Amino acid sequence: MFEKVLIANRGEIALRIHRACREMGIKTVAVHSTADADAMHVKLADEAVCIGPAAAKDSYLNKAAIISAAVMTGADAIHPGYGFLSENAEFAEMVEAHGITFIGPSPEMIRLLGDKISAKKMALDAGLPVVPGSDGAVQSVAEAQEIAEKIGYPVIIKATAGGGGKGMKIARSADEMQEAFELAQKEALNAFGNDSVYLEKYLENPRHIEVQVLADNYGHVVHLGERDCSLQRNHQKVLEETPSPALNPEQRQQIGEIVVNAMKKIGYTNVGTVEFLYENGQFYFLEMNTRVQVEHPITEAVTGIDIVRDQIRISSGAALGYEQADIRFNGYAMDCRINAEDPNTFIPRAGTIGQWHTPGGLDVRVDSEMYAGYTVPPNYDSLIAKLIVHGRTRNGVLMRLRRSLEEFVIEGIPTTIPLHQRIISDPEFIDGQYNIHWLEKFLRK
Ligand code: ADP
């Protein structure tokens, strides 16, 4: 097992990783920007190293500074968390070249699955159902129009290097193609430094359902069920739940088995999430995330499995130690992403937190780095807390969530708590009747 892990991230996930390491008797090294010197995990870590100024490109994305910190402190592994360098194959390679373990899959796997076109090819070869679309990158508007005629409008133009919902544009007719295509290219170039785009059939009313997997280095692969992440705004997840209200136990088992077999075929190791769109009883592979995800705690709540702990164990060369048949799915769970944003305009708001009181009680978990007097810096993602609630029934979860949101006190900055309160009181949401467009329609009401 590792003796010391460097946490190459910030915010709630950095604290989450610190907690897993602590419980495993592993020492931690926090790396932080000048803006994060007061962060909770920086205070709690055994060692802390400032790696640069506030701008992420100079700190959390500064590969050389992070690796230097690892070498300097004698860390034997680096946990990248999510975002930042977590899906950067070059970084994973650099880490390994320094004799340090990258806590994640191999750099080759990250590279193959990080490129949406090669990922789709791999998924298809491994027997996963995919969204109909172009075979690879599309070079011109004319070519895009030709493919769209074949698969039928509407289509969605997506960045090959995509992530975070950026670089996606919909075209409903040949006339709309030129503008949508050029906009997608431009957005892709700005966000990813690469203007390569491809085409997919645009599904009108799908749900977003993803399957969590864990795989060790010895061919053992298990799935931990699915998460329904259909509640989105601007293609970004707002509230997630498991199990999905759209699936019955047979469908769950079926998609889980398909995913496990595909992971075995491609030789995947470590944690990962296979994302699908789901419409009219059909799954369509979207992409695979080769890292721990923001919403992983709802899966932990229903399975009792510590995903980050097992990820670290697997990375250190340990066997998974359990099989699919050992995994029990117990009850229901939901996660509210609480952002420091205006709940009406969604404009991120930095500032100093006055009172800070988190809800508690049975089956209530808050993952957050915040505390009273802490100043939220303006430089990063606006996620400040995740409220994760578990219960025996879905209705019980809703009641518990309502009570927990009511108890939450965050003074000094606006948050999306009022939005979550509205969502979970809506009859359609309570019924589980929603798809990826539901939230945006709800917000226009
Ligand atoms: P990213 O990597 O940027 O998150 P994804 O490919 O995972 O991009 O897609 C993010 C979201 O965009 C999906 O959850 C869905 O809401 C929407 N989306 C992507 N592809 C399609 C499609 N073919 N049809 C309809 N919606 C789509």
Image (tube, rainbow, N blue to C red):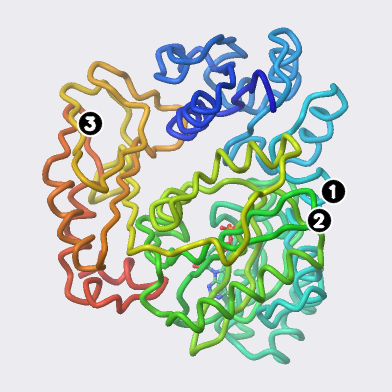
Query: In the rendering, at what x and y percent does residue 385 appear?
Result: 34, 38
Q: Which is more N-terminal, label 1 or label 3?
A: 1
Toward the viewer: 36 or 386?
386
Packing grade of label 3 (10 A; few <14, some 14-19, many >=20) is some
Cα separation between marks 2 and 3: 41 Å
Residue type at mark 1 is Glu
Query: In the rendering, at what x and y percent does residue 196 appear?
Result: 76, 59
Are the residues tagged 1 and 2 within 8 Å (C-beta)?
yes
Query: In the rendering, at what x and y percent does residue 209 appear?
Result: 50, 69
Residue to which mark 1 is pinned: 108
Is residue 177 shown above or below 114? below
Ligand 1 shows up in the quarter that is bottom right
Residue to which mark 3 is pinned: 413
Residue to which mark 2 is pinned: 112
Cα separation between marks 1 and 2: 6 Å
Toward the viewer: 229 or 255?
255
Q: Give the secondary structure at mark 3.
A: loop
Residue type at mark 2 is Leu
